[in-house]
Amino acid sequence: MEHNAAGLYLPKTAKVQSVIEENSQIKTFALSLSMGAQPTVFRFQPGQFVMVSMPHCGEAPISIASSNSRTDSFDLSVRLAGRLTSAMHSLQPGDSVGIRGPFGRPFPLDKLVGTDLLFIAGGIGLAPLRSVILSCLADPRFSDNRITLLYGSRSPADIAFCTDLAAWEKSGRVDCHLTVDHGTPDWKGSVGLVTSLLDTVAPNPTRTKALVCGPGLMIRAVLAELTCLGFDPNDIITTLERHMKCGVGVCRHCHLDDKLVCRDGPVFTLAELQGHEVMELAT
């Protein structure tokens, strides 16, 4: 990689096409890069991220949340967390942000063909997994894959991507199981940790690939539970968050011992993480 290439460090302008309020803390932005009146083709693989910037607000990595079959636009789901994300939550269609990327190692889609797929997500962690699910649903190679989603939220009001969840369940292609930490009087679903849903779906570890994303404590608990169920460490795949500055492996701010999350990840198998403190890495 030529690290002095201007394209790695100079952001391109992306225009907001639409905004969806997923819940009180998360919004999904459809963005497009354009040259004049024509949209610019934007290609990526699920699991990759972009560096997003706004004037006087800094820059941060955000996972791409849309299908890789879309090339004229892409989605970013953003949770309120600081100055940049607060500024993004004020964006309206027609506004612009700076984009660098896509960067990072994606999920290994080719290795997922022909297997059962178990997605386990917590909160905003469904965003990068949403990209994988939508990409698989649009790819005929996955027409026979059994796809199961376990999704945990703090409360019913915190459940995000409700439109997607309803569409996936209606299609019959994705078996969706939801749980919340704290229920409400009108909540009829499960209450408890997302790991409790594993007993419900009883995955077969010999033919299942598990893809995991969420808060650090959740990731650590899920990885431990999947290991106890007999999953091979190479069949457990997660994506980690880390404070990134350059996004291309130059500044080494996101170092993970001998790895860089921006370059060697953010997607890792459990086999690649063994020997590291997953809870610390994933927060």
Image (spheres, grey):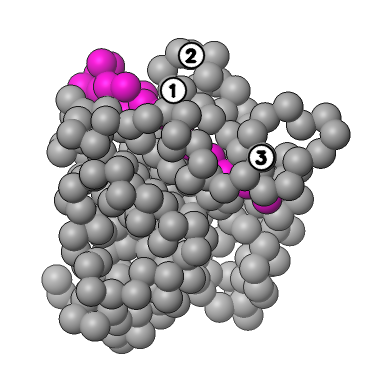
Relative vertical location of residue 3 with respect to residue 238 in this rendering, above or below? below
Q: Mark 1: which amino acid?
A: Val
Q: Earlier in the sequence, mark 3 or mark 1?
A: 1
Relative vertical location of residue 13 with respect to residue 165 in this rendering, above or below? below
Q: Mark 2: which amino acid?
A: Ser
User: Which of the numbered marks, if any, corresponds to residue 171?
Assistant: 2
Q: Earlier in the sequence, mark 2 or mark 3?
A: 2
- Marks 1 and 2 in Cβ contact (< 8 Å): yes
* Of 7 and 227, the residue lying toward us: 227
For label 3, the residue is 191
Residue extent of the magenta highlight: 134-154
Q: Residue at x 44, y 34 (%)?
A: 199
Task: Give the image location of residue 181, x and y in percent.
Answer: 67, 48
Q: Which mark lies nearer to you, 3 or 1?
A: 3
Q: Mark 3: which amino acid?
A: Val
Residue 70 left/right relative to 193: left
Task: Give the image location of residue 64, x and y in percent.
Answer: 43, 50
Q: Residue at x 35, y 55 (%)?
A: 223
Residue 283 left/right relative to 262: right
